[in-house]
């Protein structure tokens, strides 16, 4: 092994040690009834914060569910955009 190869291996090992996995503490599992409630709340204009409080989950998990549902065509644009906040949930 040359010094250059040894240096490349060391750099690769150091680089791998600096890796980080995003959202590994997030819960991506949703009960289907909660997904239906989410869709209703989305259509009503509830804010991400209101939904996070309602479902007792971090706002980021709500945002990721919104992205998933938008990608699948289950929710669309709404007044107030992604963050919403135009209505209070009546549920």
Image: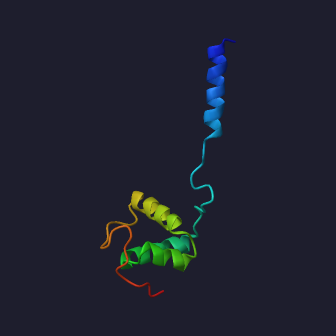
Q: Quadrant of residue 74?
A: bottom left
Residue at screen point 37% across, 79% down: 44
Residue at screen point 44% across, 84% down: 89
> Where does residue 12 sit, x and y in percent of width and height?
62, 29
The N terminus, quarter of image: top right
- In this view of the protein, can residue 71 be seen by the observer? yes
> Where does residue 50 sit, x and y in percent of width and height?
47, 78
> Where does residue 32 sit, x and y in percent of width and height?
55, 70
User: In the displayed image of the protein, which residue is found farthest to the top?
Assistant: 2
> Where does residue 91 sit, x and y in percent of width and height?
48, 86
Please tell me whether residue 9 is drawn above or below residue 33 in the rendered image. Answer: above
Please tell me whether residue 74 is drawn above or below residue 46 in the rendered image. Answer: above
Front residue (pair 44, 12) = 12
How is the rendered protein coloured? rainbow
Q: Is residue 5 left or right of residue 33?
A: right
User: In the displayed image of the protein, which residue is found farthest to the left?
Assistant: 79
- In this view of the protein, can residue 37 be seen by the observer? no
Q: Is residue 69 left or right of residue 33?
A: left
User: In the displayed image of the protein, which residue is found farthest to the right?
Assistant: 1
Q: Is residue 41 left or right of residue 4?
A: left
Q: Quadrant of residue 83?
A: bottom left
Residue at screen point 43% across, 77% down: 41
User: In the displayed image of the protein, which residue is found farthest to the bottom?
Assistant: 90
């Amino acid at each position: 092994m040359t010094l250059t190869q040894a240096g490349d291996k060391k750099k690769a090992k150091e680089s791998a040690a600096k890796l980080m996995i995003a959202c590994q503490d997030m819960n991506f599992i949703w009960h289907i009834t909660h997904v239906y409630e989410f869709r209703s709340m989305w259509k009503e204009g509830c804010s991400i914060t209101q939904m996070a409080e309602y479902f007792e989950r971090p706002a980021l998990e709500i945002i990721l569910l919104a992205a998933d549902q938008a990608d699948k065509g289950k929710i669309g644009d709404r007044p107030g955009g992604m963050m919403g906040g135009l209505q209070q949930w009546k549920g």
